[in-house]
Amino acid sequence: MEFTAVACNLLTKKTDCLVITLGTQVTDDAPAKSSALEAIDNATSGLISRLLKSGDLKQEPNSSVLINEPQGLSADRLLILGTGSKPLNEQSFVALAKNIAAQLTKLPIKTACISLAGLEVDLRDGHWQAQQLASQVAQSGYLFNPFKNKEKKPTTLKQVTLALPSRKGLDKSKTHLNLGNAIANGVNLSRELGDLPGNICTPSYLANQAKKIAKKHPKLSCKVLDEKQMKALGMGSLLSVTAGTVQPAKLIVLEYNCGNKSDKPVVLVGKGVTFDSGGISLKPGAAMDEMKYDMCGAASVLGTFAALTDADLPINVVGIIPAVENMPSGKATKPGDIVKSMSGQTIEILNTDAEGRLILCDALTYAGRYKPKAIVDIATLTGACVMALGSHATGMLSNNDELAASLDTAGQISADRVWRLPLWNEYDKQLKSNFADMANIGGRQAGTITAACFLGRFTKDYHWAHLDIAGTAWNSGANKGATGRPVSLLVQFLVEQL
């Protein structure tokens, strides 16, 4: 999908569909007040005023009217949307953008022109609106049906134009539109990888996808370590998870070097369990199919790198993905087994279904060789996080206040929010083992926090944050599918580092 911004006259703009919003100054019984709305209202012989007075169009979120062949305009269609009478916040604007996107992508159109004149968003300017609009419209074009005989047809929408009242800020709006589109492409890649079944999206498949992304940018490289190489590095914790499957584990490393050579990189580490049966600690059968989504941390890292290459951001970033499959067999790791991690610390595995932290700890140790500015790991790690925060916010824990604040800010800007949980020594004590340096679980209480405490034992030498996306990475039920979160958050976080 292509996005651009132009300064144009809405009355003479030729497009398959012209989209306008009422803005916050319009009420249910008052005529249009903003210059753009007033011009369209006059050109259409008071159409907007009549629709408001008749109640066919309401000044409330999700209210809309579609007019075919509107007299007085050059556009083939006119889509009018209510926005409410109060200034919007990030979440309500994103909801509006999603509504616009949903309506446009189901119409038989190729082009659309959108005017956001008169809209106010608390603490956010028009450039932010442009970025979010492009991101939501491009995301709405996502369609996953490669295995259905009767395929649903993709949207026909190919070109979206943002109409501005003047050329002031035009180039910056184009930049933000392109960034929003790049983010959406990364989100959609992440969703696609998550939605693929575990018999296709294996560790080897993820490695091949990483190589494909690397080929798209001259300053992005990819290397993949096999089990023999990981064994030589002492990654006994990671390899313990893959012991029960025939699928070989992979450690995927992406290096994006578009910043200054002297700049330390940000390292993103994504959990890549392509299917999690729980191992010997077998999960219940109900909804076990959703454990194909246990690689969504890895998918978000790959989606972020896809966005980086599209946007060509001038920054140094390293991506590390430990990719495994967790299955039960005669060779599988057993509860009570003790393994040695790459760091030299030993781990008593009390539950083989707490496997994500076992692969992440070795990846986090490996990340230290890059002398990073900061490390952020992303993982569908604990069901406890779903119970605590639901599907609205990603759980965040960090050993550095400045890093945590940066992620929180990026979450607000991207409307992909996080909520910080404590990382205290009192919780860390729950990991005590009678037979090893630590256990891989800390009991029933505070499961999200003790999981992060476990990872914290491998990240003491650098600034680190952990994102638990167990509640935000996918939706269940009738709308089952990967969300692509937190790609938007991660890209915005990297933009804020520039």
Image (tube, rainbow, N blue to C red):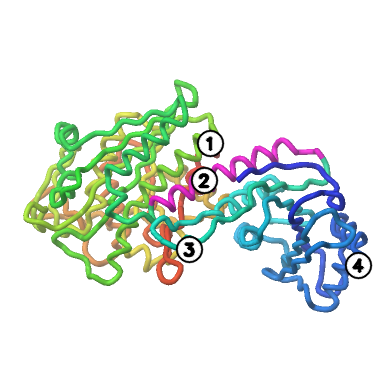
Which disc number belongs to residue 185?
Answer: 2
The x and y percentages for residue 174 are: 68, 39
- Who comes first in sequence, dot 1 or dot 2? 2
The x and y percentages for residue 456 are: 29, 46
Q: Regarding mark 4 in the picture, which secondary structure is present there?
A: loop
How packed mark 2 is, by other alpha carbons closer than 10 Å (few <14, some 14-19, many 20 or more), is many
Report, in whole angstroms, how far the alpha carbon at label 1 lies from the one at label 4.
44 Å
The verdict on residue 179 being magenta is yes
The verdict on residue 433 being magenta is no
Q: Regarding mark 2 in the picture, which secondary structure is present there?
A: helix
Question: Residue type at mark 3?
Answer: His
Q: Regarding mark 1 in the picture, which secondary structure is present there?
A: helix
The x and y percentages for residue 51 are: 83, 73
Which disc number belongs to residue 392?
Answer: 3
- Who comes first in sequence, dot 1 or dot 4? 4
Residue 72's image quarter? bottom right
Q: What residue does disc 4 label?
A: 46
Which disc number belongs to residue 310?
Answer: 1
